[in-house]
Image (cartoon, helix red, strand yellow):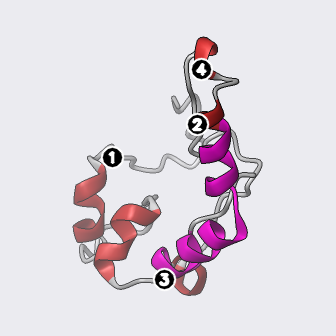
Amino acid sequence: MDITDNPRNLKIMELEGAQLPRVLDDPKVDVAIISTTYLQQTGLSPVRDGIFIEDKNSPYVNIIVTREDNKDAQNVKEFMQSYQSPEVAKAAETIFNGGAVPGW
C-alpha cells in the first residue's frame, strides 16, 4: 500500500516486521502497525493493548489459494472444511490472544 497524502506531516518509517516489537520501546515512536505474529513477541495483547484490529472483511486478510486445476480436488475441499472450523477459530483466538480474526 502506498501513502498518497500526509496532511498531518507525520514522520513515517517503513521497517521489517521483525523489527517492530523493538521499536515500541523507543520514546520517539508513537504508533506501530504490527501483525499479530510479531506482536506475540512483546507480551502485548491485540485485544487489550491494540487501538485497531482489522475487520474480517478487510482486503488484507490472509487467504488460502490453490491452482485452478486443484480447486475441486477432494483434499483441498477437506482442508478448507477442516481449516474453516470453530476448532481452528478457537485455537487461533487462544494462540494469538484474540488478535486473529477469522476471515470466513
Residue 75, disc: 2
Look at mark 1 in the image and give the residue it sits on. Answer: 13
Residue with the most extreme front position: 74
Q: Nearer the viewer, residue 51 or 104?
A: 104
Secondary structure beneath dot 2 equals: helix
Q: Amino acid under label 3?
A: Ser
Which of discs 1 and 4 lies nearer the camera? The answer is 4
Q: Front-most of 68 and 77? A: 77
Quarter of the image where one finds residue 28 = bottom left
Q: Earlier in the sequence, mark 3 or mark 2?
A: 3
Residue visible at 61% across and 55% down in the picture:
83
Residue type pointed to by label 2: Asn
Q: Main secondary structure of the magenta part?
A: helix
What is the number of the mark on residue 45? 3
Which label belongs to residue 70? 4
Q: Position of residue 52 (x, y in %)?
A: 63, 67
Instruction: State yes or no: residue 90 in magenta.
Output: yes
Within 10 angstroms of label 2, few (less than 14), some, or many (20 or more) residues? few
Question: In the rendered view, does 41 fall on the left or right side of 57?
Answer: left
Local packing at callout 4 (Cα closer than 10 Å; few below 14, some 14-19, many 20+) is few
Q: What distance separates the C-alpha of mark 4 from that of mark 3?
A: 37 Å
From the viewer's perspective, is the residue at label 4 or at label 3 nearer?
Answer: 4
Q: Of the two numbered discs 4 and 3 on the same chain, state the one appearing first in sequence.
A: 3
Residue type at numbered disc 1: Met
Asked if residue 11 lies left or right of residue 8, the reply is left
